Image (spheres, grey):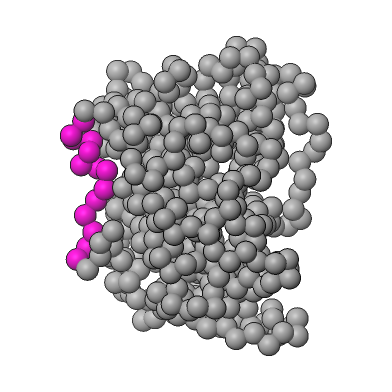
């Protein structure tokens, strides 16, 4: 596969990530001095994007100068947040909002963009950003199809860009410690990984509702096949009186617009599972219900299985070894022996929501300044996303799927190959 990450390189990146920042060759582009201000544009201003914007704008040496969304009221909210913040700091900062993301990318004074749109837009916006010479913080899952991920890897590397994936658990000391213990053999031979992710997506069954006047629904759909509008796909807000989203957008839970929990939480917990396995992907994917299998199962070339199963209410990961076990989630860490526990209590980040972890965002800024890959570079994001998507494909076919993690392609399966990519609406192409 052209411009693909080699198996050895992937393993090196996975292991180095346990210790902290990656030590990779310099990427192309201007190297910022410590005193340079990095100018950001934020694309996608829902609940996640606005939260990321709030944290980036408060970082030293970072300034958010442009925002973009297809929903007018959310653009106005973001612009007001930024203007109020910089006014209180006594800074005269021009803030511009745009309906179309390409207007942000066209600005020569913007160094990097934060992309927090629905998943079906990730690949096209990120590839365009690479071509425009912008570095990128991209929300997970990386892309909507496997081919999109391959093309995004190519775009990042061919254009010498920094791309950080919003897989915050890789920056969490508890998850890092768990993987470190597994890699050093502290629980003996790894025998199984339990990754509590959640269910597959449902068919889109929400009732049709009128499209708000200031929401460009055609642009929200973009390359996605048409579905009718419902507020749960793009939660409404109010500026007067102030009222933010009261729930997460539910486009992620329908197969027409997302991958369900398989890609939403899988992008986190399957990612940690593969990190612990030190593998670039499974060799077989077995859907639930096949030959008595109760859960979605990924089989790796060493025979170890990663299973989407619930052993506790919280979403998390459990590593089972011949000599012990470790379980870790966002709320804590537990193990079969005290010697496997972290030596110090996990550092807290105040009242910052987990998804907005400052250490992870700070790692992105550090990567920009030093022209190095961040803790979750594009190749890891692509391989994790591919694992999630393979689970969807196997479930859709109702049978196991064979996969080659070296060539990153199906093994003798023309039927599965049909799901490598999907058709876009007229006017859009990869």
Percent x, y of residue 425 = 22, 63
Rendered residue at 36%/61% (across/down):
124
Q: Between residue 18 and residue 197, name the one nearer to us.
A: 18
Instruction: State which quarter of the image contains the N terminus.
Output: top left
**As drawn, 430 above or below 8:** below
Q: Residue furthest top?
A: 322
Q: Specify the farthest residue to the right.
A: 344
Residue 295 visible, this orientation: no
Residue 313, position as x, y percentages in the image: 57, 35
User: Which of the 4 image quarters holds residue 89?
Assistant: bottom right
Does residue 416 show up magenta in the picture? yes
Residue in the picture at 19% in, 66% down: 426
Q: Main secondary structure of the magenta part?
A: loop
Q: Which residues are magenta?
A: 413-426
Residue 392 vertical placement versus 370 (above, below): above
In the picture provided, is 49 more to the left or to the right than 2? right
Q: Quadrant of the C terminus?
A: bottom left
Number of numbered discs on residues? 0
The image shows residue 110 at horizontal and vertical percentages of 54, 74
Closest to the observer, 80 or 173: 173
Q: Position of residue 301 (x, y in %)?
A: 42, 20
- Nearer-the-camera pick, 398 or 121: 121
Is residue 362 visible in the rendered image? The answer is yes
Q: Which of 25/131 is in front?
A: 25
Residue drawn where x is 45% and y is 32% of the image: 7
Q: Is residue 354 magenta?
A: no
Instruction: Using residue 269 as the reference point, say whether residue 421 is left or right of it.
Output: left
């Amino acid at each position: 596969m052209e411009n693909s990450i080699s198996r050895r390189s992937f393993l090196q990146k996975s292991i180095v990530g346990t210790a902290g920042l990656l030590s990779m060759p310099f990427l192309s582009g201007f190297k910022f001095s410590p005193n340079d201000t990095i100018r950001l544009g934020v694309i996608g201003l829902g609940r996640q994007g606005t939260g990321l914007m709030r944290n980036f704008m408060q970082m030293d040496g970072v300034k958010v100068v442009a925002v973009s969304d297809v929903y007018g009221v959310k653009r106005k909210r973001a612009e007001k947040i930024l203007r109020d913040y910089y006014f209180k700091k006594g800074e005269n900062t021009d803030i511009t909002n745009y309906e179309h993301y390409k207007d942000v990318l066209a600005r020569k004074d913007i160094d990097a963009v934060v992309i927090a749109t629905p998943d079906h837009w990730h690949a096209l916006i990120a590839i365009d950003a690479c071509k425009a010479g912008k570095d990128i913080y991209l929300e997970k899952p990386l892309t909507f199809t496997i081919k999109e991920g391959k093309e995004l890897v190519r775009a990042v590397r061919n254009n010498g860009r920094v791309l950080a994936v919003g897989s915050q658990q890789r920056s969490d000391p508890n998850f890092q410690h768990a993987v470190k213990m597994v890699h050093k053999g502290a629980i003996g031979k790894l025998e199984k990984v339990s990754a509590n992710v959640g269910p597959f997506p449902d068919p889109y069954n929400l009732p049709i509702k009128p499209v708000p006047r200031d929401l460009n629904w055609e642009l929200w759909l973009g390359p996605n096949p048409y579905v009718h509008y419902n507020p749960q796909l793009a939660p409404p807000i109010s500026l007067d009186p102030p009222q933010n989203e009261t729930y997460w957008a539910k486009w992620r839970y329908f197969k027409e617009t997302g991958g369900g929990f398989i890609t939403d939480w899988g992008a986190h917990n399957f990612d940690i599972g593969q990190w612990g396995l030190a593998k670039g992907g499974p060799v077989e994917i077995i859907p639930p219900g096949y030959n008595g299998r109760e859960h979605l199962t990924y089989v790796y070339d060493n025979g170890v299985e990663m299973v989407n199963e619930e052993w506790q209410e919280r979403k998390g990961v459990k590593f089972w070894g011949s000599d012990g076990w470790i379980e870790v989630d966002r709320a804590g860490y537990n193990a079969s022996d005290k010697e496997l526990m972290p030596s110090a209590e996990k550092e807290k980040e105040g009242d910052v929501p987990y998804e907005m972890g400052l250490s992870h965002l700070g790692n992105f800024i550090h990567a920009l300044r030093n022209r190095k890959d961040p803790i979750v570079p594009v190749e890891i994001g692509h391989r994790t996303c591919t694992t999630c998507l393979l689970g969807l494909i196997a479930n859709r076919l109702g049978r196991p799927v064979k996969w080659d993690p070296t060539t990153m392609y199906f093994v003798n399966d023309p039927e599965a190959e049909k799901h490598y990519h999907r058709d876009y609406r007229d006017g859009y192409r990869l």
